[in-house]
Structure formats: structure tokens, C-alpha cells
């Protein structure tokens, strides 16, 4: 590749886009990107991949080695195209335009090869900022390689990764779906990056309150005139003139919107970054700080499936020791886990229609706790009760989720499952020394009705037996 090290501070940030459908990228002449190109704030050129082919059919693809459907784009054609992007004057609108290089200086900047692909890393706002900063530094130029069909031969990125004139290869994705080609993803990246280049936005401060900026949460809803439209009024606080109230309202709506639509953006926030008002707004949406200071929630509960057996067994192995009394030895605890809380044991439970295993998780899909309900609760230790009994055999949450409402969500799901199965009451045994657990179950309507003993290894432990009746239609 014809390039030499060193920066050219007098050149605008440069991006070359290569595609077999250059007309797809005509949108780059519009809006802010088009104005930035026209004013020289960014140098974007679109190239036709077929311009570097050497056969009369202008072939860019061939059948895949190893067989399979579709066609793969040829590595020799793509490498020629990438090299050819360096043989143009640094001016907007230039193209590869054939093989002639006479009178054209090579661009001295290093290349960053950007490849849109479903298998790439998800493009984020921090990525866009990093690319904009890098492009503005003046020592790199970007080449966007828009693949089609089954993709570009993998040797192109392998070759590029070892080329001294290429700073790096960055494969990126704009979402978990598949497009017909990379052009749409290229447009998305260009829109995201170019608007962050110096001088492109008329008011750079407008970026600060956008979604994913600052602390990374979503932007609040916005309104304009008329104040009343189709019977819908602008929120009164926005017309109050009270700037402090407006700022608080916007913050609360941003947190509310994030919790409802993108709760996966919340875990990076810590309690120290949030005000009391922030925490109160999030609590309304079921998001609470865990013991580690990170936010958890909203908590969801679903019925576990056979494929979840290993996950549930892991949760059981982590949480069971926390409920054991101090007198339980480590050896006995480990033996109990191996015999009664193994993957095979939970696989059997999950295949049995008489057992219900529930998983609590947050919207980052992290498992937080589990419960096991025996729908036929008439075991040897069951309390005397006239009616159908279900037994809550296990109900545990991880320490980091304690105090977040996770256990309460799990309990509500337990009671619903029991009621749906026709149970008239739910009973359980809880270690007599586990004062916190006893208090928790009493808070959820369970009352002491007896006692029992059980074994963990060679040690005998003492339980209180608790019972809660289930009025028809009620599972609170």
C-alpha cells in the first residue's frame, strides 16, 4: 500500500467508502454530512469496487471454498480497491477512477480499515467519539469497505492487520440483525462520526444532553409549539418558567425512559453518581442499588427450562452456603450441594411437570436468584392442612441483589405459580437461626405452624415450618 508515516494537519478528516453500489451512498450529499463535505470540514469519497476489476465482466465475487450458499467477494479485487483509495488528491468527491496514478500524490496518512459486518463489535456512541477524535488528529484516513453477498474473503482483514501502513482493522455492527450489504451500516457510522467533527454542528453543546452522552442514559422527551395539539398538552412544568423544576423533570423522565426502554444502560451507574431524586425516580421503575453499589433491575421472573439446569445449579451452589448455620462444616455443605443441587438434579426437576423452577434476572439478562416449588407439597414434613399444598423448597437471591426487590418479585412469582396450579396454601421450612429469612417470610404472610429437622451431611439442623394460605385470585 502506497503511504508513508506522518500526519498532514492541513488536510481535512478523510473517509473513503468502497461499494459495488456507489449510488446507495448519494445520501452523503444531504443534510449535515453534505454541508460538511461542501464546506471542506470532511473529505468523503465514494468508490465503485468494480472500477479496479480487470476482466470484461467486472467480476468481484466467486463461489465459497468448502461449499455453501451464496458468493464471497474476492480478496484480490478488494485489496486493489483499498490500495487505490490512497491514489487520489485529498478533495471531496474524488474517486478511484481507474488504475492511472500519474500526477497523483499518495496520501501520507495511515489507514484505518472499517468493515461493517454482523460479526463485528456493536457500534456505540463512545466509539463514534473515539473515531471522530482520531480522524481530527490528521494522521489517519478511514477506508469503509462495504461488503455484499456472503461477505468479503477473510484474508482481506488478515492481510490488512499485518500491513505496516494500516493502523488497525475495525469490524463493527450496528445491531443484531443482518442487512443485504454494508452500505446502510456505513451511512450510520458516517452520520454518527461526522456530526462530532469540529465545526460540523452549529451548537456543539447540543450534544451534551443527547442519548448515550454524559452518563450514558437516554434523552428526555422533547416538545415544541403548539402547546395544545390534538387534545394533548405539553407538560405544565415545561411552560412554568421554573428552570430548576424543568431540569428535574427532564432528568426524571430520562431515567424513567432508560429504565423502561434500555435498562441495560443503567448498571454502569453507581449510587455515588446519582442524587436522592435520581434514586427515587429509578425506584418507581423497579431499579434499586444492590449491595455492591450498582443498579439492579427492573427484575423479571420467568419459568426455567431444561437448558437452564446448569445456570440454576450454579445459583444454588452460590446461595445455599449463605443460608446454612455457622455449625455447618464446609465439607458437609459441599457434599450436600453435590448430592442435592447438581445439574442432574435440576435437570430432573425441570423435566417434571410437578415441579416449578423460577429464575429471577434483570434486563441485562444476569441471573439474580431462583426458586423451586413442589406443586404436590404433601411430603413427610408437610404441616397439617385441609386443602391442596405446594411446598416452596428453595428461594434464594445472590447477595448483590439483596435489598433490591428481587426477592419480592421472586416470591410474587412463586405464589402466582402455586395459585395457578390450584394450591390452597404454600409451606416452607427455614432454619431457626436464619433470623433475616424468618423476618422476610413473615413479611410475605407466612406464619409459623410447626417445626422439623433436616440433615446437611452428618449434622442435624432445626427448621421452623411456615405456612401461607392463598385466597382465590390473590397472589400478592
Image (tube, helix red, strand yellow):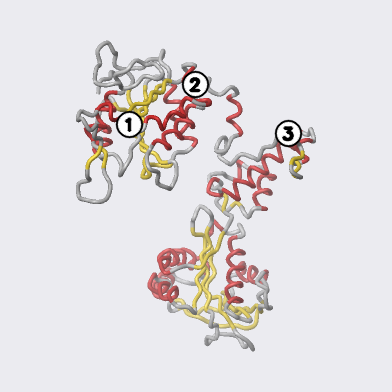
Residue 474 disc label: none
For marks 1 and 2, the one nearer the N-term is 2
Of residues 108 and 148, the one nearer the viewer is 148
- Residue 50 location, x and y as percent? 28, 30
Answer above or below: position of 85 versus 431: above
Q: Are marks 3 and 1 in contact (CB under 8 Å)?
A: no
Q: Do the residues labelled 1 and 2 touch (CB within 8 Å)?
A: no
Q: Do the residues labelled 3 and 2 touch (CB within 8 Å)?
A: no
Q: Is mark 3 on a helix, strand or loop?
A: loop
Left or right of residue 336, residue 296 in this image: right
Residue at 56% x, 24% y is 201
Of residues 335 and 19, the one nearer the viewer is 19
Q: Is mark 2 on a helix, strand or loop?
A: helix
The answer for how far apart the CA atoms under marks 3 and 2 are is 30 Å
Of residues 338 and 258, the one nearer the viewer is 258
From the image, state whether disc 1 or disc 2 is nearer to you: 2
Residue 36 disc label: 2
Q: Which residue lies furthest to the top in this view?
A: 103
Q: Is mark 1 on a helix, strand or loop?
A: strand
The answer for how far apart the CA atoms under marks 3 and 1 are is 48 Å
Residue 168 disc label: 1
Q: Which residue lies furthest to the front in this view?
A: 56
Amino acid at each position: 500500500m502506497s503511504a508513508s508515516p506522518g500526519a498532514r494537519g492541513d488536510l481535512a478528516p478523510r473517509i473513503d467508502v468502497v461499494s459495488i453500489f456507489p449510488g446507495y451512498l448519494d445520501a452523503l450529499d444531504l443534510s449535515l454530512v453534505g454541508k460538511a463535505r461542501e464546506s471542506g470540514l470532511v473529505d468523503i469519497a465514494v468508490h465503485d469496487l468494480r472500477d479496479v476489476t480487470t476482466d470484461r465482466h467486472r467480476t468481484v465475487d466467486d463461489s465459497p471454498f468448502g461449499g455453501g450458499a451464496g458468493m464471497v467477494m474476492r480478496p484480490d479485487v478488494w485489496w486493489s480497491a483499498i490500495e487505490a483509495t490512497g491514489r487520489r488528491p485529498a478533495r471531496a468527491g474524488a474517486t478511484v477512477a481507474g488504475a492511472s496514478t500519474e500526477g497523483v500524490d499518495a496520501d501520507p496518512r495511515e489507514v484505518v480499515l472499517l468493515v461493517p459486518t454482523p460479526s463485528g463489535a456493536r457500534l456505540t456512541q463512545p466509539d463514534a467519539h473515539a473515531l471522530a477524535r482520531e480522524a481530527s488528529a490528521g494522521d489517519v484516513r478511514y477506508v469503509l469497505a462495504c461488503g455484499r453477498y456472503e461477505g468479503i474473503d477473510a484474508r482481506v482483514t488478515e492481510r490488512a492487520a499485518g500491513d505496516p501502513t494500516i493502523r488497525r482493522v475495525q469490524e463493527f455492527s450496528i445491531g443484531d440483525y443482518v442487512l443485504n450489504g454494508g452500505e446502510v451500516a456505513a451511512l450510520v457510522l458516517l452520520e454518527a462520526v461526522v456530526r462530532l467533527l469540529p465545526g460540523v454542528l452549529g451548537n456543539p453543546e447540543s450534544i451534551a444532553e443527547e442519548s448515550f452522552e454524559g452518563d450514558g442514559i437516554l434523552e428526555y422527551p422533547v416538545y415544541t409549539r403548539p402547546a395544545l395539539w390534538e387534545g394533548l398538552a405539553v407538560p405544565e412544568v415545561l411552560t412554568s418558567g421554573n428552570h430548576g423544576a424543568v431540569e428535574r423533570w427532564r432528568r426524571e423522565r430520562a431515567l424513567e425512559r432508560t429504565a423502561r426502554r434500555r435498562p441495560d444502560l443503567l448498571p454502569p451507574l453507581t449510587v455515588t453518581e446519582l442524587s436522592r431524586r435520581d434514586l427515587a425516580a429509578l425506584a418507581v421503575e423497579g431499579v434499586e442499588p444492590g449491595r455492591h453499589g450498582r443498579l439492579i433491575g427492573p427484575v423479571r421472573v420467568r419459568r426455567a427450562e431444561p437448558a437452564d439446569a446448569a445456570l440454576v445449579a450454579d445459583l444454588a451452589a452460590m446461595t445455599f452456603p449463605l443460608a446454612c448455620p455457622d455449625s455447618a462444616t464446609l465439607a458437609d455443605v459441599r457434599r450436600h450441594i453435590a448430592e442435592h443441587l447438581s445439574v442432574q438434579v435440576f435437570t430432573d426437576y425441570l423435566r417434571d411437570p410437578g415441579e416449578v423452577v423460577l429464575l429471577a434476572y434483570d434486563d441485562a439478562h444476569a441471573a439474580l436468584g431462583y426458586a423451586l416449588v413442589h406443586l404436590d407439597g404433601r411430603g413427610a414434613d408437610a404441616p397439617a392442612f385441609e386443602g391442596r399444598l405446594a411446598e416452596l423448597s428453595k428461594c434464594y437471591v445472590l447477595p448483590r441483589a439483596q435489598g433490591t426487590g428481587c426477592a419480592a418479585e421472586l416470591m410474587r412469582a412463586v405464589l402466582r405459580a402455586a395459585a395457578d396450579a390450584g394450591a390452597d396454601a404454600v409451606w416452607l421450612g427455614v432454619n431457626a437461626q436464619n433470623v433475616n429469612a424468618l423476618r422476610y417470610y413473615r413479611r410475605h404472610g407466612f406464619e409459623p405452624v410447626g417445626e422439623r429437622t433436616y440433615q446437611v451431611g452428618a449434622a442435624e439442623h432445626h427448621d421452623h415450618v411456615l405456612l401461607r394460605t392463598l385466597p382465590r385470585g390473590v397472589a400478592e
